[in-house]
Image (cartoon, helix red, strand yellow):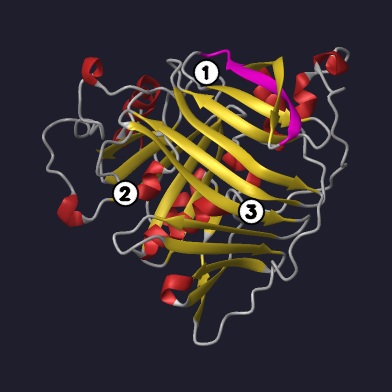
Amino acid sequence: MMRLKVLAAILLKITVIALSEVQPQDSLRYHRKDFASGSPWDLLGTPRFKTLQGKIQVTVFLPEGARSWTAELWADENRSRGQLFLPHPGGPRQIVTFTLPDGFWVWLPFEKRAIRYEGSEFPSWRDIWQIRTDKLDMAKSNYTLRVIGRDRISGHFCLILQMEPKAKGNATRKIWVHPPTRLPLQVERFSPDGQLEIRITLTEAKINEPLPVMIFDTSVPPGWTVQTLSIQRKKVDLGQASKVLGFTPLLPTWVPPGYVLEGIFALGEHRWKMAHIVYTDGIGVISIFQHLTPPKKRPPTMGQPFPPLKKPFGSPPHERPPHGGHPPRGVPPIQRLFPHRVVVCEVGDLTVVLVSEVSQEWLEKVVNSLSPSER
């Protein structure tokens, strides 16, 4: 349960880190002709504004139907507050997060508990849109971007961009960008086979307007318990990883076209260690998590290089569900907030989990290129 709450907090955190400077202009004069001498990629640079408030509405399109969840957001240049309600058998559970220059807080009002996290950098707000300003040069090599129209989101004029991958195993995106601030107000992501998977919209958006007084006050209410927790995430070299993790991570011998190794990160501390291996092409990300399999769960050696691939969706290709294979019914709600494809397997003495939005075929090819003989 605790790990579920931490995962929820980190996931919500993606939506609520403070943003930077704004210019309040908003006019229909912004259209594709304004970028005839420039590049649509300029619209995906670092946003420019001072305050932001509104609701982030996420709609996930699953085989059994669409599901939505909403998080409220308040932010200035240096601080942010977000809150959402997670479903629970005992009734919705509110989670409130604060991102401040001196730390990251999670409030759990239903438990009268406040948690302060330290020791790690949390994801940027832009990760929810999956557009990283520090990787745009790489993205330009692997995607094409063009202006396809205009629209209004929450009353703000936007240009609609379409981002298409050059390699067909990647996702396609439509991005509604507010030109004066370069803020994405809506993003739609489509699976490699063209199915709409997720829509993220900033509704009731107020840009550069005064924020509510004391909205970032983290004075803990009387009677609450206060905890301080440390989350360790350290970048390591492959040659030093075994000393930090207690095992040597496996790197795939095949990755999709355009993807490069961004880094190997050690997660956890003391008795529990996990490797997080990240590959990216500037937009898409493939996360490979690895940890030692507990001895009692290690499979017997059957004369194979490693046990057969365990596919979480359990059905052969011709029977896979729509949208590229989403988690089936029964998957915990946190894992259903964002649709991704997942492969879980055991390679030698390691449990390996791959998570990405790329095609299932690509993920399986990556995991099948791992071999314990390289250890």
Asked if the residues shown at circle 2 and circle 1 are in contact, with their CB atoms under 8 angstroms apart, the answer is: no
Picture coordinates of residue 22 (x, y %)?
Answer: 84, 44
Question: For the residue carrying disc 1, how many other residues have a C-alpha within 10 Å: few (<14), some (14-19), or many (20+)?
Answer: few
Residue at left 12%, top 32%? 303
**In front of the other: 355 or 219:** 219
- Relative to residue 138, is residue 256 drawn left or right? left
Residue at left 53%, top 56%? 233
Q: Residues in magenta?
A: 155-167
- Give amino acid for label 1: Pro
- Relative to residue 48, is residue 12 drawn left or right? left
- Relative to residue 43, is residue 268 drawn left or right? left
Picture coordinates of residue 34 (x, y %)?
Answer: 87, 18
Question: For the residue carrying disc 2, how many other residues have a C-alpha within 10 Å: few (<14), some (14-19), or many (20+)?
Answer: few
Residue placed under numbered mark 3 in the picture: 73
- Give amino acid for label 2: Pro
Residue at left 84%, top 23%? 30
Q: Is residue 310 visible?
A: yes
Question: For the residue carrying disc 3, how many other residues have a C-alpha within 10 Å: few (<14), some (14-19), or many (20+)?
Answer: many
Residue placed under numbered mark 1 in the picture: 257
| The quadrant where residue 2 appears | bottom left
Picture coordinates of residue 257 (x, y %)?
Answer: 52, 18
**In front of the other: 251 or 71:** 71
- Relative to residue 142, is residue 366 drawn left or right? left
Q: Quadrant of the C terminus?
A: top left
Residue placed under numbered mark 2 in the picture: 332
Picture coordinates of residue 284 (x, y %)?
Answer: 54, 29
Quote the CA–CA distance across marks 2 and 3: 24 Å
Indicate whether 91 appears above or below 310.
below
State the predominant SS element of the stretch in magenta: strand
Q: Nearer the viewer, mark 1 or mark 3?
A: 3
Q: Nearer the viewer, mark 2 or mark 3?
A: 3
